[in-house]
Amino acid sequence: MINSPRVCVQVQSVYIEAQSAPDEERYVFAYTVTIRNLGRESVQLLGRYWLITNGNGRETEVQGEGVVGVQPHIEPGNEYQYTSGAVLETPLGTMQGHYDMVDANGNPFSIDIPVFRLAVPALIH
């Protein structure tokens, strides 16, 4: 598989305080991913791989078909956005990974998801 410049991935993460329990080492984060098709042909996302690292360096790998239960087709010039979540035992961590995709001709390629931070925001007084 090769990386393709035709697809751009952006991620934003937020801390979900209402679902977290710091006393129980449970920190809940949501992340919203935007996948933009910058190419001239449609693409389909078939699978995902995540490497989640908590603040103590413990790594968890997650992989599977599609994202949030779908394998979206993304037409040229369009984007697909979804929100999912992760639970860490520490208030700081990172995620990174890749999407397995195919182009309109069925040729497989991989898109890297750059590392992004999951962090409890600093308290401002």
Image (spheres, grey):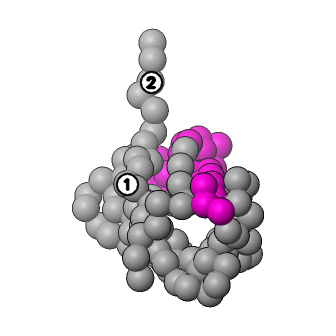
**What is the C-alpha distance between the residues marked 1 and 2?**
24 Å
Name the secondary structure under disc 2. Answer: loop
Horizontally, residue 94 falls left or right of residue 10, namely: left
Question: Could you tell me which quadrant the C terminus lies in?
Answer: top left
As displayed, is residue 107 above or below residue 70? Answer: below
Mark number, residue 125: none
- Residue at the spot of label 2: 123
Disc 1 marks which amino acid?
Answer: Val
**Outermost residue toward the left?**
57
Name the secondary structure under disc 1. Answer: strand
How crowded pointer 1 is (Cα within 10 Å; few <14, some 14-19, many 20+) is rated as some
Judge depth for marks 1 and 2 and give the one in front.
1
Span of residues in magenta:
13-40
- Residue at the spot of label 1: 115
Disc 2 marks which amino acid?
Answer: Leu
Horizontally, residue 81 falls left or right of residue 17, namely: right
Residue at left offset 52%, top offset 84%: 108
Whether residue 20 can be seen here: no
Q: Is residue 28 magenta?
A: yes
As displayed, is residue 49 above or below residue 96? Answer: below
Residue 45 placed where, x, y %? 63, 74
How crowded pointer 2 is (Cα within 10 Å; few <14, some 14-19, many 20+) is rated as few
Closer to the camera in the image, 111 or 2: 2
**Outermost residue toward the bottom?**
106
Residue 86 placed where, x, y %? 53, 60
Closer to the camera in the image, 19 or 2: 2
Residue at left offset 44%, top offset 24%: 123
